Amino acid sequence: MTSASRNFGRWAAAIIWLTLPLLAGPVFADALDPCSPGFQHTASIGLWGFWGIGLVAALVPSTVSLTALRILAPASLVAAAWAVLASPDRADATASIALAVTSLVTVIALSAFVGDRFVNGSSYGDERRMPLRAPGALLLGPLPLTWLVVVGGGCAGPLLLALRNWIPGALLLIVGWPAAAIGVRALHGLSQRWLVFVPAGVVVVDRMVLTDALLVQRQRVAGIGIVEAIAGTRTMGRSAANADPDSDTHTDTDLTAGALGPRLRIALSTPELIVPAASRLRRSEPIEPYEVGAVLVVPSRPGWALAEARTRRLIA
């Protein structure tokens, strides 16, 4: 990853987010103008509060900031779309600019450049974290739904109270805020899934599939490479034939959690013991550790992971 890419990931979201009041503010003002004073004040305070939180998150890279930014940036786009529909001058230039700038900040916040820079904002010493892609099954429904619970649960109660809908507003406040907190915690878990390069070797950190992180010491790394597809891999707790007949009798174990994209295969010279994560649906079942000879993960950018492996002389 070049220095230009790192600088883009570090500053692009902050610069665009800083311009939101100037570029998107007018359309919000037009949309709120016909509303009651109570709703105007509540919405204005909420918008400025969320903008301030987003600006701090964009300026201070960390895994927590990444979660906050990836919640607030899409929320800004949804809010701008509402403002455009509610504005009497929805076809003018200010509406187009508001939608364009909020769309841009959303794309940037969700980009691999920002993800890479922000997760490394929380790294320690000489380590390099590579974000892992979200499981494909989550992208098809659970992830957007959780985001909707977070944003809707946090905003609906105060806005209804501002409209003097006391009972629905109070109920949504009591139920929505705890639900939003649970949703934030779930979304933050996706920001804490990494492939980490450290001086001692390489580490897979993913509580969705592993109870404890898997550390492969550098002298035990037999190879790292990208594979498009592998037949006969081993999912957590199930045996299968080795996908690479030329390597040895070890088994490839899928730690991707169903993520889409090219897989990175980390081959081990000697087996390592892993402890799979407990299934949320079958918590009563005992957890049985087992040995693996190679593991598969899906970094957000596998090419960057290969480049880092070469830089650290883990592969030729």
Image: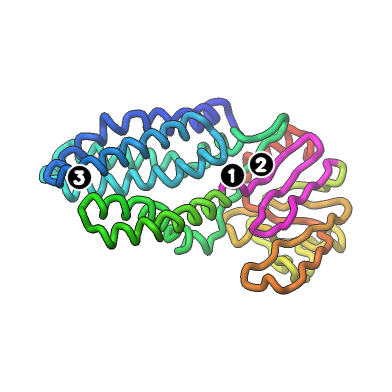
**Nearest to the observer: residue 25 or residue 42:** 42
Proximity of marks 2 and 1: CB atoms separated by less than 8 Å = yes
**Nearest to the observer: residue 282 or residue 80:** 282
Q: Which residue is mark 1?
A: 301
Residue 38 sits in quarter: top left
**Nearest to the observer: residue 104 or residue 176:** 176
Q: Which mark is residue 206?
A: none
Q: Amino acid at mark 2?
A: Ala
Q: Secondary structure at mark 2?
A: helix
Work out whether mark 3 precedes mark 2 in sequence or the reverse, and give the earlier one.
3
Q: Amino acid at mark 3?
A: Gly
- Location of the C terminus by quadrant is top right
Look at the image and give the residue range highlighted in magenta.
191-218
Q: Which residue is mark 3?
A: 38
Up-down relation of residue 135 to residue 43 (above or below): below
Number of residues whose C-alpha sits closer than 10 Å to that of mark 1, classed few (under 14), some (14–19) or many (20 or more): some
